């Protein structure tokens, strides 16, 4: 199935095409990605071609297997966290919450880890890759708030400073390398184990129960809408494949190409927040 490409301003063909598509479906499985949150100041990983804009994120294996990587990860995250925490939902989040309020969302499955959909009012949501606002101990499995870990970092590092060189995706930050060796990384306050944000790192698998819940929702849907995702990560792309295999209409709203363009029935290359907002208006 070839997508029908529409490249237009929010006031033009893209809005009309999306409005018409939404009006024809009542149980929509929504999958969102980083493009939903760029309007909130959270950078994405990939460009319009789906290629990496920067070095790929740290893998789980590197985080837990190399003390230098562990220290560097938490040093950068400690600088990036305050800005990440200050992000607010944008028009895309608000529009998808409004779509749910109209009774048309079967489930919203997000690849993002920022919790902005829920803060905008979405209740039928699953965080496919987890949430950055929680941290888990890899030794005793204790789960704590990320804010508490930030407090512990500040206690362990009185007077430590790093120069912010740039904001990076998912609460990361580019900082000067010279500051990292003096940083004391956080450990579990109960057992001293390594800590990891409660998100799925590269090299980890999405929990099976989470995937099954999403599959069940897709089975009950009558269409699938992808918003702000290139679908280059298989954990999200597989749902587009399942939708196409089941004969569900698949619409995509994203800047640039996606991995599912050739199986979509509608592809809109348009501003995400403005297009969604106008289509629901």
Image (cartoon, rainbow, N blue to C red):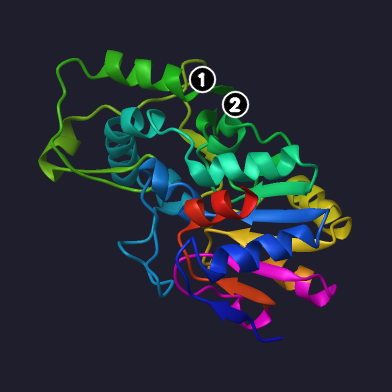
The answer to whether residue 130 shows anywhere in this view is no
Q: Is residue 200 above or below residue 6?
A: above
Q: Is residue 232 left or right of residue 3?
A: left
Q: Nearer the viewer, residue 142 or 230?
A: 230
Query: Residue 204, image x and y in percent?
Result: 57, 53
Q: Residue at x 84, y 75 (%)?
A: 247
Q: Is residue 108 above or below residue 249?
A: above
Q: Nearer the viewer, residue 142 or 56?
A: 56
Q: Disc 1 marks which residue?
A: 191
Q: Residue at x 46, y 16 (%)?
A: 189
Q: Is residue 20 above or below residue 67?
A: below
The answer to whether residue 192 shows anywhere in this view is yes
Determine crowd level at label 2: few under 14, some 14-19, many 20+ residues with C-alpha closer than 10 A.
some
Q: Secondary structure at mark 2?
A: loop
**Quarter of the image that includes the N terminus:** bottom right
Quadrant position of residue 250? bottom right
Q: Residue at x 48, y 75 (%)?
A: 7
Q: Disc 2 marks which residue?
A: 140
**Contact (CB < 8 A) between labels 1 and 2?**
yes
Q: Is residue 203 left or right of residue 239?
A: left
Query: Residue 6, image x and y in percent?
Result: 54, 76
Determine crowd level at label 1: few under 14, some 14-19, many 20+ residues with C-alpha closer than 10 A.
few
Q: Which residues are magenta?
A: 244-263
Query: Residue 69, image x and y in percent?
Result: 32, 46
Taking the view exactly as shown, the residue that stands out farthest to the bottom is 2
Taking the view exactly as shown, the residue that stands out farthest to the right is 220
């Amino acid at each position: 199935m070839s997508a029908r490409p529409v490249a237009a301003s929010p006031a033009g063909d893209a809005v009309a095409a999306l409005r018409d598509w939404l009006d024809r479906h009542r149980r929509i499985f929504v999958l969102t990605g980083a493009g939903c949150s760029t309007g909130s100041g959270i950078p994405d990983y990939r460009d319009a071609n789906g290629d990496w804009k920067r070095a790929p994120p740290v893998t789980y294996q590197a985080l837990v297997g190399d003390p230098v990587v562990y220290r560097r990860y938490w040093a950068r995250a400690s600088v990036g966290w305050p800005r990440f925490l200050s992000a607010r939902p944008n028009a895309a989040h608000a529009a998808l919450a409004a779509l749910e309020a109209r009774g048309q969302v079967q489930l919203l499955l997000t690849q993002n880890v920022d919790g902005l959909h829920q803060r905008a009012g979405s209740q039928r949501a699953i965080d496919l890759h987890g949430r950055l606002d929680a941290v888990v101990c890899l030794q005793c499995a204790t789960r704590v708030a990320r804010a508490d870990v930030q407090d512990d970092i500040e206690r362990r590092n009185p007077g430590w400073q790093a120069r912010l060189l740039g904001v990076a995706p998912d609460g990361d930050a580019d900082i000067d390398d010279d500051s990292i060796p003096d940083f004391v990384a956080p450990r579990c306050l109960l057992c001293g184990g390594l800590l990891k944000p409660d998100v799925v790192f590269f090299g980890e698998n999405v929990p099976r129960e989470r995937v099954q819940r999403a599959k069940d929702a897709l089975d009950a849907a009558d269409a699938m809408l992808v918003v702000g995702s290139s679908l280059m990560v298989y954990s999200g792309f597989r749902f587009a494949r399942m939708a196409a295999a089941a004969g569900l209409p698949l619409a995509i709203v994203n800047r640039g190409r996606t991995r599912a363009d050739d199986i979509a029935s509608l592809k809109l290359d348009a501003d995400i927040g403005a297009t969604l907002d106008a289509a629901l208006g």
